Amino acid sequence: MNAPRIRASDILPAQRGGFHVGRIFNPEVGGPSIVLADGEELIDITDLGPTTSVLFAREDLLATLRDAQSDHERQRWLLQDALEFDPQISPASDLRLLSPIDLQVVKAAGVTFVESMLERVIEEHSGGDSTKAEGIRSQLTESIGGAISSIEPGSPDAAKVKDILKAEGLWSQYLEVGIGPDPEIFTKAAVLSSVGTGSLIGVHAKSSWNNPEPEAVIVVRSDGQPIGATLGNDVNLRDFEGRSALLLTEAKDNNASCAIGPFVRIFDEDFDMDSVRNLDVDLRVEGEDGFVLEGTSSMKNISRDPVSLIASAWGEHHQYPDGFVLFTGTLFAPTQDRHTKGGGFTHDLGDIVRISTPSLGALVNEVTQSQDAPEWTDGIWNFIQNLSARGLLKADPA
């Protein structure tokens, strides 16, 4: 396998403007630095908050970023230099892009789009066997697809549909969280385990039916206030989850199975939650065999409003002192046959996955097995030790 050679122009937002915050591994300090994208340059803003969780909690965040952008005395790197990192051969100590988050908890909302909800039902009824999926897909689409698409989750109409489907033996745990009163909210990945643009993403070696999940990801402060958005790949093992929903953790959380990036775009007068509600998140998968898969997940078709999903994750019932990010789910569930008729889509090693939208840029990764991806070694204690050695741990970064 060869790691993708990515150009800076490939990942930068097509829509210019706004404040885009990321993280790099900085070889000069042996640890992460927080950066602000300025064209094809990255400005060091680590002094404004030693972690993105601290930085994003600042009440003067926009003004602080605006001042930093105009400060030409700050250290700068070329984005292209960070993208030259090759995860297959480059030393781990080289300059590279990291996931733009650090101490935030990585949460995810599942089954938030009707189309992908039906695919979860298919996984369940097929027992994780991709060869049985097409027949079940046709049956379910004919029976319930159109009827459910306009139902508001948790509404009286949804309750009526639930009763009808139960009577017909078609009810499913996925339909429960898809149109029932409560959404599925789960922990996608451990703190500091997500990877960024240019890194390898991993699928478990035992999986033969898996796929990318292109999603809008909302970044939320500890007080429940959303402050920005980015892109994410909620790598999923369909065969694992299809065998049993109790295998969700094994299906979702493996080495390098969560990619986020390239940057967090901070909410301002030109980009806010309404902008997120109208995002079209594009996916393109290119295989070494010439196979190409394309699709779009439109946030306009989400069944639950992003703000309501945040309220389900955060509130009096659950707090996140360092903030959290929330994957909002995906409309896209690939069904295009790749290897065998009726077998549907699954990843091959070496696939290049590109998730993009004009306002946020592109998240680009290559697929490998989780067992072959770089081991996750930089945990919270190493992170804190590095910040301490650099003199960055102080009560007030301002």
Image (cartoon, rainbow, N blue to C red):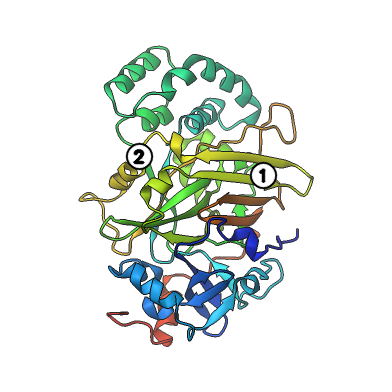
213 vs 241, nearest the viewer: 213
Within 10 angstroms of label 1, few (less than 14), some, or many (20 or more) residues?
Answer: many
Q: Is residue 370 visible?
A: no
Residue on which disc 1 sits: 347
Helix, strand or loop at label 1? It is loop
Q: Amino acid at mark 2?
A: Asp
Query: Which residue is drawn at the image coordinates 63% and 23% (left, top)?
Result: 134
Measure the alpha-carbon separation of dots 1 and 2. 30 Å
Q: Is residue 299 visible?
A: yes
| Circles 1 and 2 in contact, beta carbons < 8 Å | no
| Residue 136 screen position, x and y as percent | 57, 21
Helix, strand or loop at label 2? It is loop
Query: Which residue is drawn at the image coordinates 74% and 31% (left, top)?
Result: 340
Residue on which disc 2 sits: 305
Image quadrant of residue 294?
top right
Which quarter shows the C terminus? bottom left
293 vs 105, nearest the viewer: 293
Q: Amino acid at mark 1?
A: His
| Residue 46 screen position, x and y as percent | 43, 78
**Vertical side of 308 occupied by 130: above or below:** above
